[in-house]
Image (cartoon, helix red, strand yellow):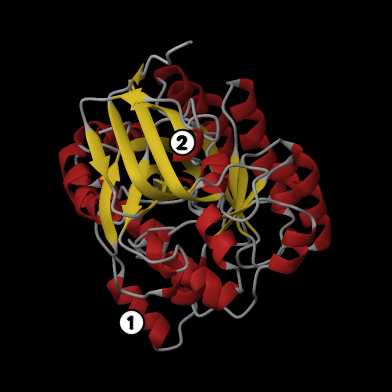
């Protein structure tokens, strides 16, 4: 008779209900009698207790029937910046359009002025309360973009600040270089020269310094043209950096199809996306990141083509788009509710959109986003009767505890 020897693990969560989000499993991959075992910060087992091997652990947590999901992932934020744009919010309430504000020297450029005037310590201090609000809702991974410096030194300072946040808090930070966010004042009227500078100086220096995990751009009538964006993407690819894109937010500039051509991790916003863009994203495996906070805050009326994206099996992610001008949102739970109510996403789509598909949008799906062996033990444990409550409630946080890399 063979006697099974218990496997050692660092921590064990038992008496839990799991939503694993593992691809290929029906629905959310729900397991009623679940356990999760962790060793060296990674999951070594997540599944039905009846099928599990015996585990020996010094730290056993009885979850008392609570739900465990992967830790939440906010895959599109502009968390690092100085100042705010509450005055512009008042102007928009009075009927001034976002485009008019931008052309009058407000919008992104106004935040550029404030951010350039702030040092790195000040940028970190301003970002920490927003990051803490997201962490308090179960966020374990976050993407943070630059784009409010628009000089090499200022962009590097933003990216360093973002990376420092990941050292000051238990959270995974992915950084995106968004130098192609707006044309800075010193290049006013000469966007092509600024793109030259981006491609020849900024991207090589930032890649060499290892400060960015991806390169992003704002392809729009008040941003950069398709041709200019392609040049930025070509330079990013030459330096081994994947790309992402703010696409089709205010108009159909065909940016999503361009992003797909470069194998982009994601195309984000997408309210004005057309069928060709949907098809291109599907073929390239580019994730659609939907940002209902910006849609709501700007009182937009053109909905992203969710049905077409769904029909084409384009992965759907959700994010806060936390930024000072168009989405001052620091609640991923509320972003899910907005995604369901405004964009008619299903509960399963919303929940997968802030876990598995958000991880996909950041190129992190091999490390996090689902509950399965080999991935980081990033967990959110909830005081809810069913996962739908996480999408249903507004202004209520049912997080019981949050685990990042097993702790």
**150 relative to 82, above or below:** above
Q: Earlier in the sequence, mark 1 or mark 2?
A: 2
* Local secondary structure at mark 1: helix
**149 relative to 153, above or below:** below
Q: Residue furthest top?
A: 1
Using the rendered view, name the quadrant where residue 105 is placed: bottom left
Residue in the foreground of this view, choosing between 237 and 205: 237
Residue at image point 16% right, 46% down: 125
Residue at image point 48% right, 72% down: 338
Residue 353 in picture, x, y percent from top left: 54, 54
* Local secondary structure at mark 2: strand
Question: What whole-number distance in Å separates the C-alpha atoms at marks 1 and 2?
Answer: 49 Å
Q: Which residue is mark 1?
A: 90
Residue in the foreground of this view, choosing between 107 and 327: 327
Residue at image point 60% right, 68% down: 346
Q: Which residue is mark 2?
A: 46
Residue 207 in picture, x, y percent from top left: 48, 22
**Which numbered disc covers residue 50?**
none
Whether tag 1 and tag 2 are in contact, CB under 8 A, the answer is no
Q: Is residue 103 visible?
A: no
């Amino acid at each position: 008779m063979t006697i099974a020897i218990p496997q050692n693990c660092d921590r064990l969560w038992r008496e839990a209900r799991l939503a694993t989000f593992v691809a290929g499993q029906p629905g959310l991959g729900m397991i009623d009698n679940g356990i999760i075992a962790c060793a060296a910060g990674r999951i070594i087992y997540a599944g039905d207790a009846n099928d599990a091997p015996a585990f020996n652990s010094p730290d056993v947590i009885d979850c008392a029937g609570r739900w465990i999901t992967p830790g939440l992932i906010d895959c599109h934020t502009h968390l690092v910046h100085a100042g705010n744009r509450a005055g512009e919010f008042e102007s928009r309430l009075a009927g001034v359009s976002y485009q008019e504000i931008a052309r009058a020297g407000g919008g992104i450029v106004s935040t550029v002025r404030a951010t350039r005037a702030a040092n790195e310590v000040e940028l970190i201090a301003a970002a920490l309360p927003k990051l803490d609000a997201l962490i308090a809702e179960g966020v374990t991974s976050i993407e943070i973009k630059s784009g409010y410096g628009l000089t090499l030194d200022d962009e590097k300072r933003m990216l360093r600040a973002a990376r420092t946040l990941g050292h000051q808090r238990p959270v995974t930070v992915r950084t995106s270089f968004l130098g192609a966010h707006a044309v800075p004042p010193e290049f006013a009227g000469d966007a092509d020269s600024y793109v030259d500078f981006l491609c020849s100086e900024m991207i090589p220096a930032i890649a060499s310094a290892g400060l960015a995990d991806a390169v992003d751009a704002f392809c729009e009538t008040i941003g950069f043209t398709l041709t200019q964006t392609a040049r930025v993407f070509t330079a990013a690819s030459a330096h081994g950096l994947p790309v992402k894109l703010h696409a089709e937010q205010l108009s159909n500039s065909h940016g999503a199809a361009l992003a797909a051509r470069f194998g982009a991790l994601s195309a984000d916003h997408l309210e004005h996306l057309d069928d060709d863009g949907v098809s291109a994203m599907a073929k390239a495996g580019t994730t659609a990141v939907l940002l209902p906070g910006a849609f709501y805050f700007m009182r937009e009326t053109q909905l992203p083509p969710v049905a077409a994206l769904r029909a084409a099996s384009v992965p759907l992610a959700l994010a806060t788009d936390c930024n000072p001008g168009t989405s001052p949102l620091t609640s991923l739970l509320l972003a899910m509710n907005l995604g369901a109510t405004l964009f008619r996403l299903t509960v399963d789509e919303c929940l997968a959109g802030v876990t598995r598909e958000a991880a996909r949008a950041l190129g992190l799906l091999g490390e996090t986003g689902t509950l399965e062996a080999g991935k980081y033990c990033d967990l959110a444990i909830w005081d809810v009767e069913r996962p739908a409550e996480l999408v249903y409630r507004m202004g209520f946080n049912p997080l019981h505890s949050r685990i990042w890399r097993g702790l």
